[in-house]
Image (cartoon, rainbow, N blue to C red):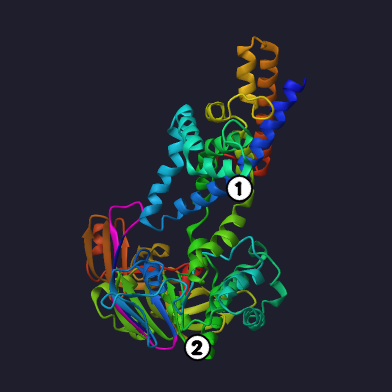
Amino acid sequence: MIDARIQHRVPMAGRDQSLSLDLHLRMEPGISTLLGAHASGKTLLFECLTGIQMMKSGRILVDDQILFDSGAQVNLPVGRRPVSLVPQANCLFPHLTLRQNLQFAAQVLPAREAALRVAELLDHFGLKEVAERRPDALHTAEHRVGMIAQALVRSPRALLVDTIPDEWDSAIRLQLFDILRELAKEQRIPILVATRRLEDCFEVGGSMMVLHEGQILQQGSPSDVVRKPASITVAELFGEDLLIPAEIVFQDPQNKLSRLSVLGAEIPGPYFAGHFKGSHVTLCVAPRAVECLPRVGEICFPGHVPLVLRRAVHRAQGVRLYFEEGVTLELPEAPQQAVQPGKRWQMGIPPSAIRIL
Amino acid sequence: MESLWLPLWTSLRVACFSTLLALPVGIGVAWLAAQRKTRQTKWLDVLILFPLLLPTPVLGYYLLLAFRFGPVSSLYDLLWGNPVVFNETAATVASTIYTFPIAALLAHRVFQGIPASYVLLAQSLGATDWQTFRQIAVPLVAKPLAAIGVLTLARSLGDFGITLLVAGSVDGGSVTMPTALYLSLHAGQAGTAALFAILLTLLIVAFLFAAQMLSGGRLLR
């Protein structure tokens, strides 16, 4: 279990601002996600927990061991803390093979135990075949799994996985989440996965924490957090992406296509592996990918979702449109006669922009 | 012809020994300075730059005083039965002091190029500072450090000011090539002086090319 109260502030590199943490983190064994935008404090939190950041105020407990206590002047140095970090970037040491990378981490163990531990982890994660390869010859997933194995060499009592790069495709993300879920079950330790993507929280499962400007604003299951945001700030954090309920009405794995029933209209979508016809899902769509047009009369273009305008708010950047269906979109400009309440609009969603939660 | 080869061999010997001394010390100090773990390490910048900024005759003068009156001098005298000044040992120490800042400055630049994530990862895995330095930092920049070794060697061939003061121009071993060039000019041997100049230039060019190749064409990047 992790129980950490952290107050910490650091200047942001290259800016006049500073990044601060003021939070109480409590985690039971199992997997959890830490959702936060860029510069919300995810990496800083992990650096405080591992001891990379020199904290001035707070208290960190893992199980019953005090790692840091400003009051009692306890500060276990980095490396002696039973918390391991899998950094954000792929950073196995490039001049060492995968096995040597693990051996480097195993130096803290007695020699015989170290050799056994390295062999056991390579075997456990199916990395024996690639153990003698250098990191540049590993696939992205192998590299990241190798980093997890390296972090586990010392048998930590908590594992922190820093933000997974956004550019990684979903297959690698899913594979990694499977491994971490399994690990949480086997090791019975707290595993905290940082992410910028809401759908990762749903994929990983477990509990999620919403981190914003160094504070944990809400904690709970992903569906509860999305359904009942604790504050306007949390709601606005999700508001960047449109969340629209939908039903899968057709799946074509051969052509990688699907059709979705969305707000009474049928639209094309991509193939959703692991989901079936009739599944009720929540679509997650970036507003910038959406085409939003006023309708002429009752006519709605094929594959477009009909919407009815509730109200429009003119802002410096453009017009924000609030629709009856719960969708909010912002346009740089809109015809005056089309922004009257009750006016009919339509929304086109390209299949490539659709992700599901 | 002997007057040409003797300073050459002396210079090469002095350069090799002073590189063996200056390079590890320079690399070690550069690593500590690059880490900036304690407040004291800020002063390492001063330690690196001081010998570089101080005029070489001043450095030579201090060294001469140390060699004449310091405890090192007494110990050396006791062990070897002759004073440390005006011999090859003095020339080697002079060259080491002259060369150390360059080795340290270049190594500092190389160490700063190592992504901080590797060092932080090593530390978070429980590695000691020495393990991080020896097993991660040095192998990661092995090629640039080898290039710095060659540049240090090239630099150590060139000291004149300090060497002249502490090693003088005593025949039989302590005359390095820059000193020999100076003495030849004074003696009116313009041809010999030109030969020393050309030889030194060729050696420096050869070392530069070797360093450029070792660093993969990224000597100053």
Residue A152, image x, y percentages? 54, 79
Q: Label 2: how many residues lie within 10 Å, few (<14), some (14-19) or many (20+)? A: some
Query: What residue is pinned by disc 2?
Result: A278
Disc number at residue B173?
none
Q: Residue at x 51, y 74 (%)?
A: A269
User: Is residue B174 something one can see in this rendering?
Assistant: yes
Q: What's the amino acid at mark 1?
A: Leu
How far apart are the two marked residues, 1 and 2, measured between alpha carbons? 63 Å
In front: B217, or B169? Answer: B169
Quadrant showing the N terminus of chain A: bottom left
Hey, what amino acid is under mark 2? Answer: Gly
Tell me the residue at 54%/67% (across/down).
A168
Q: Are marks 1 and 2 on the same chain?
A: no
**Looking at the image, which residue sits at the far top?**
B188
Q: Position of residue A182 (x, y in %)?
A: 54, 87
Please give the range of residues in magenta.
A11-30
Q: Secondary structure at mark 2?
A: loop
Find residue A36 and report its image quarter.
bottom left
In this figure, which residue is indicated by the disc labeled 1? Answer: B145
- Helix, strand or loop under label 1: helix
